[in-house]
Amino acid sequence: MQKESGTARLVLIGALMSGLAFGSEAQTRQTSKVQTPAQTGIESAAAPSILVSPSEDYKIGARDVIEIKVDDAPELSITVPVNADGTFLMPYLKRVKAEGKTPEELAREIADRIRGRYLKDPNVMVAVKQFSSKSIFVLGAVKSPGVYQIEGKASLLRLITLAGGPAENYGSVAFIIHEIKKAPAAPGDSAKTGDQNAEPEFEVRTLNIAGMFKGIGLVDPNSYLEPGDIVHIPRADVFFVAGEVNAPGSFPLTEGTTLRQAIALSQGTTLNAALGNGVIFRQDPATGKRIEINVDIGAVMKGRKDDVPILANDMVIVSNSRAKTVGNSILKALGMGTAQRGIYR
């Protein structure tokens, strides 16, 4: 678990939130446990999905919009948003607390408060028309990224499943960004008053997605989400192998991948390979410039030289001559073999 602070936190969250662009067309899925906007008559082309916990009923939260119907008393029937303090105004009863109650519990409370005073035997129905309080953002390499609604405790595995499952190129790690809630300042506590205007603090958790889908870490308490969490699943890093190999192309990068493994993944070298004249093209993370690393692939494969770690976006070229005319090999590795031959200088 890791805490981010200051401007760096906001940059991190902003960068991750930009991934929502991938999910602007996420499909909406709904459940029958709570009334969705479609079920209660509100049309919405992009209504968020509801993730239902089977052990809990939906509890109303701040900013939700609720509809209250009272039989034989249309003057008491209203559709109203819940305020930030969890309350709303209702005719006759004035201010009513809704946050933390299920629709059934709120309906029962309203009926009890007007029974005998306003109606002899009131029949009250409460429905959530818009879910606004329990959003979770799912970004990155899932099939349907977007905004989802959570009810009770929900695991990362169930949320990814609701989002259509991971995309084909998903990475092995998911990041969960959670805002740390600060306790409200007590009346007269001047020491805490200034904290209310401070930048929010976030904690960042990482979870192994690859292991989770194999049944590892399913009961990890860190895999459970809370309202307001941001889940970001980066796309997998890749590297490329081109030239005189039997299966050139791009390959997902896993931790600890080496040159020997890269050659094996590309199904070995051809008979025309000049094994002593291999090249790894790599982008220098400090300068952003492309650098060239000469490697003796034959010596590495036979164990006479140390294996070479492979980094994200590395391009391994197995040449068949000493020439640097490798542009076509690069294009083939990128899936662009029909493009015009290029010359690397």
Image (tube, rainbow, N blue to C red):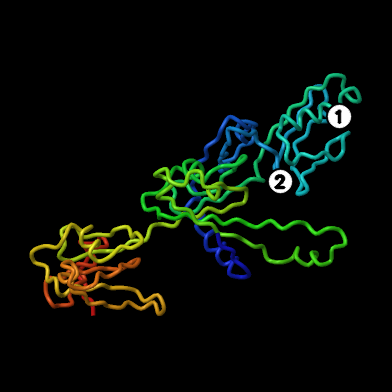
Name the quarter where the C terminus is drawn: bottom left
Q: Residue at x 59, y 65 (%)?
A: 4
Residue 40 in the image: x percent, y percent?
A: 65, 31
Mark 2 vs 1, N-terminal side: 2
Front residue of 26/184: it is 184
| Crowd around label 2: few <14 · some 14–19 · many ≥20 (10 Å) | many
Residue 22 spot, x, y in % from top left:
47, 54
Quadrant placement of the N terminus: bottom right
Task: Identify the element where label 2 is drawn.
Answer: loop
Residue hosting label 2: 63
State whether residue 215 is above or below residue 297: above
Tell me the tag on residue 113: 1
Residue 208's label in the rendered image is none
Q: Of all residues shown, which one is farthest toward the right?
A: 117
Give the x, y percent position of residue 17: 54, 58
Q: 283 left or right of 70?
A: left
Residue at position x 90%, y 22% in the image = 116
Question: Label 1 amino acid?
Answer: Arg
Q: Amino acid at mark 2?
A: Arg
The residue furthest left is 271
Q: What distance separates the C-alpha of mark 2 from that of mark 1?
A: 24 Å
Please report the residue visible at 15 percent of the width from the left and 65 percent of the height from the top. 244
The vertical placement of 230 against 51, above or below, is below
Instruction: Name the element at disc 1.
Output: helix
User: In the image, residue 325 lies at what x, y percent?
Assistant: 17, 75
Res 253 quadrant in image = bottom left
Indicate left or right for 45 with 297 as reference. right
